[in-house]
Image (spheres, rainbow, N blue to C red):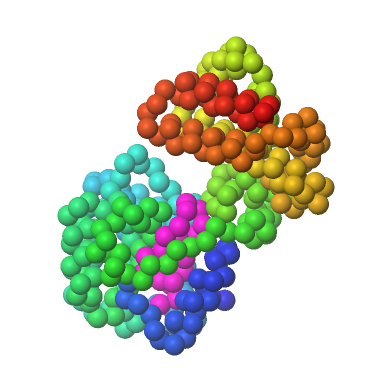
């Protein structure tokens, strides 16, 4: 079945199927969207369809087909065996591609190889597919070289790219591609996909899907975590918003020691705290009827008690302030100062 391995994305799948049926495919596609919504997965599945003969082909399944080429950011001197292992892993699960390097890039050598291969006829007559993952990580030289390919596309060669940050690409590259933005995946479809995993608790799956933000990859990562611990840490922060400044300052010091001042962990915590405030807002407006809308469906009693105690809390402002604080952390502002100021402001919003 076409695109059966893609989670969600019904709108995009239908559009691509119609283009395939009507033989109106573009020579270049760019799939963009949040991490984990399926940009890589959609790109590889489209590539498989373009080379498919209608019969099962193991080479397309494991990405060893001679007319299918996969390029992704990597060190300049990566070993061939290591490259093949990553492609094999990617073929098995395009939602969880291995990315073992800190700051890899796509070199001009990789793009020149595309141009060289494009000068030859395809091995099996259906054309060639070139997949470029995280294409925004091309070097300047590589991007300019790719632009020349796009300006004069080789006959029967399809260029399919994926990017979570398409704004970093040259506008001239984007203008020569059919850009398709993928949607966040609905919670129900993430739950259905996670239920196929072996030996995973159903309630944990439900919570992971709701915390995922529409990203299947995020949901997979959450499945491997202690979600109850993450939930309790955010709830602790949520409760500290009503304490006095002295106790809040002590809490911030303890929190940063616990997280070893790891910025990523603190930002993830704040994002989860924002979810608590959103849940409180949704629960305040809908009460028990909001069971399918709130993330922390297993903590209705906490949400109910909070709203009864602070019925006039400005929850909209609280969520906005948390998001502003997360943004400040990316600007190298002192993390402890951000947290202390945030807790002070949240206390004012809650106790107003």
Residue 73 at least partly seen: yes
110 and 124: which is toward the camera: 110
Relative placement, left or right, of 52 versus 245 is: left
| As drawn, 288 above or below 27 | above
Give me the residue at 66% from left, 19% from top: 243
212 and 128: which is toward the camera: 212
Give me the residue at 38% from left, 57% from top: 163
Range of residues picked out in magenta: 29-50
Coordinates of residue 339 in the picture (x, y in percent): 52, 24
Q: Is residue 275 magenta?
A: no
Image quadrant occupied by the C terminus: top right
Outermost bottom residue: 22
Q: How many marks are shown on the rendered structure?
A: 0
Coordinates of residue 110 in the picture (x, y in percent): 23, 58
Q: Is residue 34 magenta?
A: yes
Coordinates of residue 330 in the picture (x, y in percent): 40, 34
Image quadrant occupied by the N terminus: bottom right
Give me the residue at 74% from left, 47% from top: 285
Relative placement, left or right, of 221 versus 331 is: right
Coordinates of residue 74 in the picture (x, y in percent): 30, 48
Residue 216 at least partly seen: no
Relative placement, left or right, of 165 versus 184 is: left
Relative placement, left or right, of 13 versus 135 is: right
Q: Dividing the picture into quarters, in which one does residue 120 lie? A: bottom left
Give me the residue at 67% from left, 23% from top: 242
């Amino acid at each position: 079945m076409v695109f059966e391995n893609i989670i969600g994305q019904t709108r995009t799948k239908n559009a691509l199927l119609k283009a395939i049926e009507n033989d109106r495919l573009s020579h270049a596609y760019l799939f963009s969207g949040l991490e984990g919504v399926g940009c890589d997965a959609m790109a590889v599945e489209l590539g498989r369809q373009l080379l498919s003969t209608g019969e099962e082909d193991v080479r397309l399944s494991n990405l060893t087909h001679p007319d299918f080429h996969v390029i992704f950011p990597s060190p300049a001197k990566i070993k061939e065996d290591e490259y093949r292992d990553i492609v094999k892993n990617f073929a098995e699960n395009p939602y969880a591609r291995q990315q073992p390097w800190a700051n890899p890039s796509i070199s001009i050598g990789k793009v020149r190889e595309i141009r060289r291969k494009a000068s030859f006829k395809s091995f099996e007559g259906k054309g060639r597919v070139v997949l470029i993952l995280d294409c925004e990580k091309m070097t300047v030289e590589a991007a300019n070289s790719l632009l020349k390919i796009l300006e004069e596309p080789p006959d029967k060669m399809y260029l399919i790219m994926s990017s979570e940050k398409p704004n970093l690409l040259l506008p001239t590259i984007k203008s020569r591609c059919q850009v398709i933005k993928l949607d966040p995946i609905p919670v129900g479809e993430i739950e259905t996909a996670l239920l196929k995993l072996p030996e995973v608790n159903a309630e944990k799956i439900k919570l992971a899907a709701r915390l995922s933000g529409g990203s299947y990859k995020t949901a997979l990562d959450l499945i491997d975590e202690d979600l109850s611990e993450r939930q309790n840490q955010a709830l602790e922060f949520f409760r500290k918003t009503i304490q006095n400044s002295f106790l809040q300052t002590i809490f911030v010091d303890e929190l940063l020691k616990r997280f070893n001042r790891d910025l990523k962990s603190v930002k993830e915590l704040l994002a989860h705290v924002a979810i608590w405030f959103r849940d409180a807002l949704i629960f305040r407006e809908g009460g028990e009827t909001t069971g399918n809308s709130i993330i922390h469906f297993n903590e209705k009693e906490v949400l109910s008690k909070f709203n009864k105690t602070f019925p006039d809390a400005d929850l909209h402002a609280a969520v906005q302030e948390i998001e502003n604080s997360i943004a400040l952390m990316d600007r190298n502002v002192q993390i402890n100062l951000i947290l202390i100021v945030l807790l002070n402001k949240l206390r004012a919003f809650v106790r107003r």
